[in-house]
Image (spheres, rainbow, N blue to C red):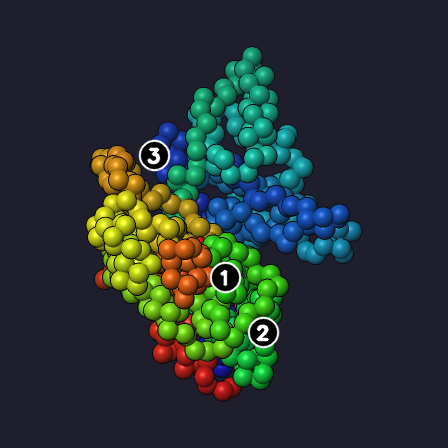
Amino acid sequence: MNALLRDTVSPSSATPAQRRARIAQAMARDGGGIAIIPTAPERRRNSDNDHPYRYDSHFHHLTGFTEPQAWLVLRSDGHSTLFCRPRDPEHEIWDGFRLGPEAAPAALGVDEAYPVGELDARLPQLLANQPAVWWCFGVHTEVAPLIEAWLAAVRRRSRDGIECPASQRDLNALLDEMRLVKDPGEIELMRRAASISASAHVRAMRFCAERFRAGATSVREYEIEAELLHEFRRHGAQSPAYPSIVAAGPNACVLHYAAADAPLLPGQLCLVDAGCEFDGYASDVTRTFPAAGRFSGPQQALYEIVLAAQNAAVSATAPGRRHHDAHDAATRVLSQGMLDSGLLDRNKVGDLDAVIETAAYRRFFMHGTGHWIGRDVHDVGDYLSAAEAPVARADGLGGTVVKKPSRILQPGMVVTLEPGLYVRPAEDVAEKFWHIGIRIEDDALITPDGCELMSRGAPVEVAEIEALMRAQA
Ligand code: GLY
Ligand code: MN
Ligand code: MN
């Protein structure tokens, strides 16, 4: 049986009810009040077509509910109210099943549920006499005016002795912290997402190798993208976690290039940055491989630098290390590689320390080495250590900046490790390196004694990639 099939998943996550209880307790410890958490709005694509619907990550974390037009209202004493679409036989013929407020308490464990059309009538009652209203600042722009209107309705009742919440509190901080450290069930889902993505990268490599073996003179980026999507969906992933990057040759030097219709030619590298979303959890994986299965000398030389940089980042990713340590480690290896390969001229930029101090490496490596990943591909969570005092740190431009230190990693956090090198044509760069863009990206779960690369089902070593692409199906 295929190990990736959906029915082998047996997550043991905290339940949404347990998560709601944790958030309610955190609010209670911090003055109490009531939280208002909407799911994501539906978005029009064109004419009368919507974009595929994706629920809000915070909302789903606290409810497990995937329908649009839904709101969770959570009091700090733990009482929960859901607003959702009412049952509607006519609409359900066109758009499918709706849970409806009658079934919601039993299905979702909320204390009560009402039709979403009753929001305006009920929210002022729910807000009355609460010390604070908690909501996620700056997430869904349409929420702020609604909350203002509900607060105004409460204020109008002050003559009746009703008190309006005295403060508005940002709920993001509590939810972000909760989501940053994944529980065993979440980790299982992330492993599943990462392994499906890894198999999609393997499929893309094999597909290119077979096409060129069969005599093709080029393969289009969209054909490779279709292979990725096929692999995601056949293993039950709901969608890509972000628009897939399939970059042929020079396109790899555009960091967020979207798969288009450029031809991939036999001597070029192909950079694929693609990951699926599985049951609400993202993966984010990049591989760079030679189109026809053999790296050229210059391609391999730069590839080995990026791989060494990723290995350095992996070694720096463990409990007790800081999030930024991986970037510092990768940047050192990349910078040394730029000097050794001649990409950077020692006579102009100086030695390794000078390259790092002046950030001369940014000409060829201009992004960070990783980010939190979870329900969102660029997941929530503070990157700085809120509890520690600010420190002076090199700003990478020859100066210093004073800020809180980078966050200390702990088991259950998940980060990407994604160094790269991108070489655009320039007179002072050897022509053999022009247009080479390389990134290697894996998803690293912090474990008690290091990290687990959950996406390593896709090969990274030069010899492994070449062997895979040589092998006939
Ligand atoms: N795929 C987007 C990123 O690597 O951050
Ligand atoms: Mn990526
Ligand atoms: Mn990434």
Could you classify mark 1 by the number of other residues whose Cα lies within 10 Å: few (under 14), some (14-19), or many (20 or more)?
Answer: many
Q: Residue 29 bears which disc, if any?
A: 3
Q: Position of residue 365 (x, y in %)?
A: 37, 53
Question: Looking at the image, which residue is at 57% across and 79% down?
Answer: 211
Q: Is the residue 226 above or below the residue 91 in the image?
A: below
Q: Which residue is mark 1?
A: 250
Q: Is the residue 334 above or below the residue 405 in the image?
A: below
The furthest residue to the bottom:
472
Q: State the CA–CA distance, disc 3 to disc 1.
A: 54 Å
> Sequence order check: which comes first, mark 2 or mark 1?
2
> Sequence order check: which comes first, mark 3 or mark 1?
3
Asked whether disc 3 touches disc 2, contact meaning CB atoms under 8 Å apart, the reply is: no
Q: Is mark 2 within 8 Å of ligand 2?
A: no
Asked whether disc 3 touches disc 1, contact meaning CB atoms under 8 Å apart, the reply is: no
Q: Amino acid at mark 1?
A: Pro
Q: Which residue is mark 2?
A: 218
Secondary structure beneath dot 3 equals: helix
Depth check: give the residue in front, 246 or 27: 246
The label nearer to you, 3 versus 1, is 1
Depth check: give the residue in front, 297 or 163: 297
The furthest residue to the front:
427
Question: Looking at the image, which residue is at 54% across and 77% down?
Answer: 207
